[in-house]
Amino acid sequence: MASWQGCDETAEEGARRLAEELRQCQADKDFVWSLWKRLQEDKPDVSQVVRMVIQRENQRAEEKASKVLEILQVKDHKIRELEQQSNAQQRELDDLERRRAAVEESISLREQLSALSTHWKESTSKTQALRHKDVETESVLVQELRKRCADLQMLLDNAQDAAKAGIEKQQQADRLQNRVDELSSQLSVQAKELAQARKDLEEVQALCRESVRHTCKQTHLLKEMQSLHLNNQHTLQQQEELHKASIGHQEEVSEHRKLGSVHTRLSED
């Protein structure tokens, strides 16, 4: 039972770890959205920030994958141990069943003892009846009956000894039956716990898949942010080029005006 309690504690610890990882994923999501708002508000050079976010997400993903793999390995090891224990107890139950069958064979000795006792009583009755019959044959009959009684007594003693042994074997069979019932109960409990452990493992695997999907979404979001950042940089470059072109055009117009003014003055002179 201690091993089962250890398995439950491991499952609870795995659930707590996954809950902590989910909370961390939510915190990472909030962190990414906060950076995105800062990008929209301030429009800074966010290349360094994006690299930091990518590094942080990669590190988080590696840590989560390592933790989930460790939990799955512990679960798999516990399940193998439980299956080995179940197989060992099933073999013990089969052995006890064979021993009980052997003990039940000795119970038939009680019936033989009862039959011998009845036969001995009948023989005794015949002996008493013969005494009232022919006196001449009484001695011979008595000797034969005594011999028969002695044989029956010996058989009776043997049967009584066998009956005692049968009683002991019956008691042993009862103890074995109690042990069989106890092991059957333990096997049923362990089967339920094994089913629960497998259910916990399926839940952990589902959480693992959910965590992987969440990580993929985060990675996709980061790629979109990086693409947006590149677009912003391209837009800024275009605006700078337009601004420079506008300034150059204004300078050309101003220079043209100055030349026109000089030309006008020269014409007036």
Image: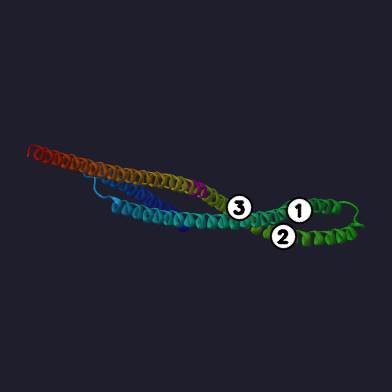
Q: Position of residue 171 (x, y in %)?
A: 62, 56
Determine crowd level at label 1: few under 14, some 14-19, many 20+ residues with C-alpha closer than 10 A: some
Q: Is residue 144 left or right of residue 4?
A: right
210 part of magenta stretch: no
Of the residues under marks 3 and 2, which one precedes in the sequence?
2
Determine crowd level at label 2: few under 14, some 14-19, many 20+ residues with C-alpha closer than 10 A: some
Q: Does 64 sit above or below residue 246?
A: below
Q: Amino acid at mark 1?
A: Gln
- Residue in the foreground of this view, choosing between 90 and 66: 66
Give the residue displayed 82% in from the left and 53% down from the top.
123
Q: Amino acid at mark 3?
A: Gln
Q: Position of residue 1 (x, y in %)?
A: 47, 56
Within the image, what quadrant is residue 131 found in?
A: bottom right
Of the residues under marks 1 and 2, which one precedes in the sequence?
1
- Residue in the foreground of this view, choosing between 55 and 102: 55
Q: Secondary structure at mark 1?
A: helix
Q: Secondary structure at mark 3?
A: helix
- Residue in the foreground of this view, choosing between 7 and 252: 252
Image quarter hosting the C terminus: top left
**Residue located beneath label 3 in the image:** 177
Q: Is residue 20 visible?
A: yes
Of the residues under marks 1 and 3, which one precedes in the sequence?
1
Residues under labels 1 and 2: Cα distance? 10 Å
Residues under labels 3 and 2: Cα distance? 22 Å
The numbered disc on residue 162 is 2
**Residue located beneath label 1 in the image:** 112
Camera-side mark, 1 or 3: 3
Q: Amino acid at mark 2?
A: Ala
Q: Which residues are magenta?
A: 194-199
